Image (tube, rainbow, N blue to C red):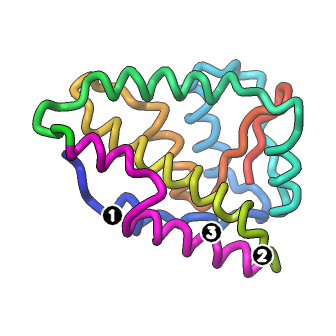
Amino acid sequence: MVTDLSVFSEAAWFSACGLPLERSDVTDARAYLDALGVHPSVRIEAVASWEHAERVLRNPRWDPSWWQREDSERRRLASGLKPQAGTSGVSALLGIGVGPGHEIILGAAMAAAARAGVHDAALIRVAAGAAGMAAHDLLLARSSELGGGQVFMRKYEVFAGGRWPLGLLGSVFQLF
């Protein structure tokens, strides 16, 4: 069972949100989209502000298909958790939003939002929840006997690089 807090503490959570996209950001996002099986014609665009990020998340055209693909992979990996993980190990993996890892991520989200003059507690919690889920999904991928988990490894890399992948709007992947 993977319990290493470095997954939470070594990432640059939200540090690049609002900045222009670097080549490495696009490369990481493209690797994530490829792992999801998203068509290569999907463009990657930067989201410039926390306010814009919230508009993307609330947009009725937000496409849930990428999330559904992740959910399928999450269920597949969970079915193959190593026996030594046991009930307590599974509970720890599913403990998104609690514990020291979550505190690290929530603190990073609060700091990044505050630097941008944003104090919307709900939006900050959504950001921290998304990042926390990415970290926990990475731990799930590492703890499953089924292997694979490239989707979650790639998504974690996007977050670890300081970005927040917001999802698809039409044929555009929104990256904050």
Main SS, magenta region, reads helix
Q: Position of residue 131 (x, y in %)?
A: 55, 54
**Comes first in the chain, label 1 or label 2:** 1
Q: Which residue is mark 3?
A: 109
Query: Is 84 left, or right, of 169 in this rendering?
Result: left
* Residue 170 falls left or right of residue 19: right
Residue 91 on the magenta span: yes
| Precedes in sequence: disc 3 or disc 2 | 3
Look at the numbered disc 2 and give the secondary structure of its residue. loop
For the residue pair 7 and 33, the one nearer the viewer reads as: 7
Q: Quadrant of residue 149?
A: top left
Could you give the CA–CA distance between mark 1 and mark 3, rounded to whole angstroms?
A: 17 Å
Q: Residue at x 43, y 40 (%)?
A: 153
Q: Disc number at residue 6? A: 1
Q: Which mark is residue 119?
A: 2
Sequence-earlier tag: 1 or 3: 1
Q: Which residues are magenta?
A: 88-115
Q: Work out which quarter of the rendered image holds the C terminus and state it.
A: bottom right
Can you tell which mark lies on residue 25? none
